[in-house]
Image: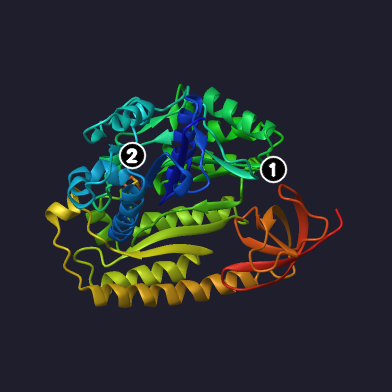
């Protein structure tokens, strides 16, 4: 009987895509997918290192798996992903029952490491080497069938923002060739996917074999069976007029741009080494609104970065009010060992101040999101149906082109349908729609 593997995934879509990559590598070696850890011969935690809380959660989970190892010592327990890369020694100390630790550039060796960990009296197996060239271009990814799926078009990051651990745990930026991306998109469309999201840490900096990100989007847009093409996460400095005009010319590319601003204070942005100021970011917003007036905008913001004064924070609130983002991912600063900020900038903002700023920021953004969603009421939109609503199986949930979650009456609708709707209501997070006859 084939060995069964269970992978528990934490963190971003990049990790979800990497778990599918690991399934692909293992399936090729005869493994089957287990529905739960209890049924598995190999259990892998694909981890995230972006915030301390995520790491603590994973240590909690590793503690839970200790009981599993006691009951079934033959199970191979592994830690993969960013935390494996960053904390291999700590994992060994705090979770000695772990059998293997593998970083994001070493997944080709996963089958061998599992075999080695499975041998009698085996030592801990570790491979956390970063590889500047690894794109896994020839690996058959084992995607979970569905409406929406991912393609990792770029791995790593060259930006080295001072607060961020990503370049240290995922290595330098490298990209998949455009023809490989298009081949994957075609294969996904043929197997029933209707939406593809192109993934990269700074996906808009994609450049490979003479093709930039605008070219890549145009090529993937050529796969006609796809209803939608999305991308995440872009970098603000990459939005040339050419890219904005390309986005406007490709109707099946989602009308949503994520522009992670991080702070509204130019002083803090400079310290973060983001490469733009609050003023140049606002100039970008002005260009986006002029060229793409229908596009929704979202952002990421960190409050409580070292040295952030109340005045800096007020500038962030001002920027948020001025831009009117449709939604935002907001966090308070969490120091990550190994980053420039952790070495050179004392984490000097008390936790209660960070929490207070975060709450005030969320209050402002929630009010804006509510108003912006309310403006959609009465308008027409196209919703790509994902599946039944969790709250009411009689309804379905989907997303508009501008990435708004929308609930519809489900009668006659199936996952993958692209439905014209009239928006009939909304909260700050969700819209409600009524299907229109086409
Ligand atoms: S761009 Fe900056 S924040 Fe984003 S992954 Fe790279 S280093 Fe981290």
Tell me which label, 2 or 1, sits earlier in the chain: 2
Q: Name the residue under label 1.
A: 227
Tell which of 79 and 221 is nearer to you: 79
Secondary structure, mark 2, is: loop
How far from the left and from the top, in percent, is residue 34?
51, 42
* Residue 332 visible in the picture: yes
Q: Is mark 1 on a helix, strand or loop?
A: loop
Q: Residue furthest right?
A: 437
Residue 2 position (above or below residue 321): above
Q: Can residue 152 be seen in this view?
A: no
Please name the residue that numbered disc 2 is placed on. 157
Label 2 CB-ligand 1 distance < 8 A:
yes
Mark 1 C-beta closer than 8 Å to ligand 1: no
164 or 4: nearer the viewer? 4
Residue 372 appears in which quarter of the rendering? bottom right
Mark 2, residues whose alpha carbon is within 10 Å: few (<14), some, or many (≥20)? many
39 sits left or right of 190 in the view: left
Residue 120 location in percent, x, y?
27, 30
Residue lying furthest front in this view?
71
Q: Is residue 158 placed above or below 412 in the rendered structure? A: above
Near-viewer residue (254 or 138): 138
Give the class, few, some or many, for how many residues have Cα within 10 Å of label 1's Cα (few <14, many ≥20): many
- Which residue occupies the foreground of this view, 314 or 389? 389
């Amino acid at each position: 009987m084939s060995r069964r593997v269970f992978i528990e995934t934490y963190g971003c879509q990049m990790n979800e895509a990497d778990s599918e990559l690991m399934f692909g590598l293992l399936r090729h070696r005869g493994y089957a997918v287990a529905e739960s850890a209890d049924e598995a011969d190999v259990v892998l935690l694909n981890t995230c290192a972006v915030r301390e809380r995520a790491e603590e959660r994973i240590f909690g989970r590793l503690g839970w798996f200790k009981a599993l190892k006691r009951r079934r010592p033959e199970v191979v327990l592994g830690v993969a992903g960013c935390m494996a890369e960053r904390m291999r020694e700590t994992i060994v100390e705090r979770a000695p029952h772990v059998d293997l630790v593998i970083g994001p550039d070493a997944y080709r060796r996963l089958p061998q490491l599992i075999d080695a960990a499975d041998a009698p009296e085996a030592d801990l197996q570790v491979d956390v080497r970063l590889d500047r060239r690894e794109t896994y271009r020839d690996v058959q990814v084992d995607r979970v069938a569905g409406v929406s799926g991912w393609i990792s078009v770029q791995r790593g990051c060259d930006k080295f923002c001072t607060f961020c651990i990503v370049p240290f745990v995922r290595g330098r930026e490298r990209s998949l060739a455009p023809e490989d991306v298009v081949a994957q998109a075609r294969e996904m469309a043929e197997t029933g996917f209707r939406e593809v999201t192109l993934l990269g840490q700074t996906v808009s900096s994609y450049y490979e074999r003479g093709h930039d990100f605008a070219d890549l989007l145009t090529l993937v847009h050529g796969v006609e069976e796809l209803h939608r093409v999305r991308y995440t996460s872009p970098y603000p400095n990459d939005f040339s007029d050419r890219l904005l005009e390309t986005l406007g010319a490709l109707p099946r590319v989602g009308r949503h741009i994520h522009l992670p601003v991080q702070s509204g204070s130019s002083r803090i942005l400079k310290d973060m080494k983001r490469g733009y100021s609050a003023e140049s970011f606002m100039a970008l917003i002005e260009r986006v609104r002029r060229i793409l007036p229908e596009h929704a905008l979202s952002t990421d913001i960190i409050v409580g970065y070292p040295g952030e004064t109340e005045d800096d924070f007020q500038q962030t609130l001002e920027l948020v009010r001025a831009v009117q983002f449709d939604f935002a991912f907001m966090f308070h600063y969490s120091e990550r060992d190994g980053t420039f900020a952790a070495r050179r900038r004392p984490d000097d903002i008390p936790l209660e101040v960070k929490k207070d700023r975060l709450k005030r920021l969320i209050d402002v953004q929630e009010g804006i999101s509510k108003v912006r969603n309310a403006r959609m009421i009465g308008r027409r939109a196209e919703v790509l149906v994902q599946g039944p609503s969790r709250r009411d199986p009689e309804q379905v949930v989907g997303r508009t082109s501008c990435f708004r979650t929308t609930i519809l009456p489900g009668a006659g609708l199936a996952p993958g349908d692209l439905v014209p709707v009239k928006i009939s209501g909304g909260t700050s997070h969700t819209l409600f729609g009524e299907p229109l006859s086409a």
